[in-house]
Image (spheres, rainbow, N blue to C red):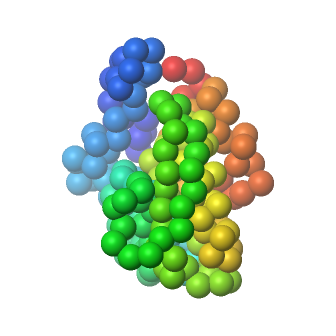
Amino acid sequence: MDLKSKIRQIPNWPIEGVNFKDITTLLEDKLVFHELIDQMCRQFEDKQIDKLVAIDARGFLLASAMAYKLGTGLCIVRKKGKLPCQTIKASYQKEYGPDTLTLHHDTIKPGEKILLVDDLIATGGTLLATIQLVEKLAGEIVGINVIIDLPFLGGSRKLNKYDLKWLVSYDSE
């Protein structure tokens, strides 16, 4: 199935000059959603994975279905102030400005095998901050799995030391 043809693009959103890639169209159709999750899981089915780390917010939608299918646990990375227990944090610069991510301080045990899941790689800031959080808790990152790579923004180059997989790539805005 050609997932790229199912992704809606919204010009000049959320700011002028950005061509937003809207993945909600992949979630609306049950056949497309099943195929999406199957394809994402196939990319890492040969790896031992203890937990998936889902990145706020679209990563939650993907990782929860993937964790169920792969038989793993699930941890969530949220924006600052959204998790109720003691957290660790990492700040980063994203394409629209600074942000801070948090993770519960006890959600990953040392040595656990971790797969990061999000919808898209742009500048790589969100994933790099998430990597900092996982490594601070001594988790072992076995891979990074996303739907979309935007290589012209440089994020995937910053993550080349990890087993990075995506399903769709856009070479330009």
Asked where in the image residue 66 lies, by quadrant, the reply is bottom left
Give the residue drawn at x 72%, y 43%. 158
Left or right: 121 in relation to 138 = left
| Residue sitting nearer the eye, 93 or 15 | 93
Give the residue drawn at x 61%, y 68%. 134
Q: Is residue 93 above or below residue 137?
A: above
Q: Is residue 42 visible?
A: no
Q: How many numbered marks does the figure carry?
A: 0
Left or right: 31 in relation to 69 = left
Residue 40: image x %, image y %? Answer: 49, 58
Q: Quadrant of the N terminus?
A: top left
- Kindly give the residue lying farthest to the right in the view shown: 161
Residue 42: image x %, image y %? Answer: 53, 63
Residue 56: image x %, image y %? Answer: 40, 55
Give the residue drawn at x 23%, y 48%. 29
| Residue sitting nearer the eye, 172 or 131 | 131
Q: Is residue 170 above or below residue 119?
A: above
Q: Is residue 61 above or below residue 113?
A: above
Q: Is residue 11 visible?
A: yes
| Residue sitting nearer the eye, 145 or 93 | 93
Residue 77: image x %, image y %? Answer: 45, 62
Give the residue drawn at x 52%, y 39%. 98
Asked where in the image residue 124 lies, by quadrant, the reply is top right
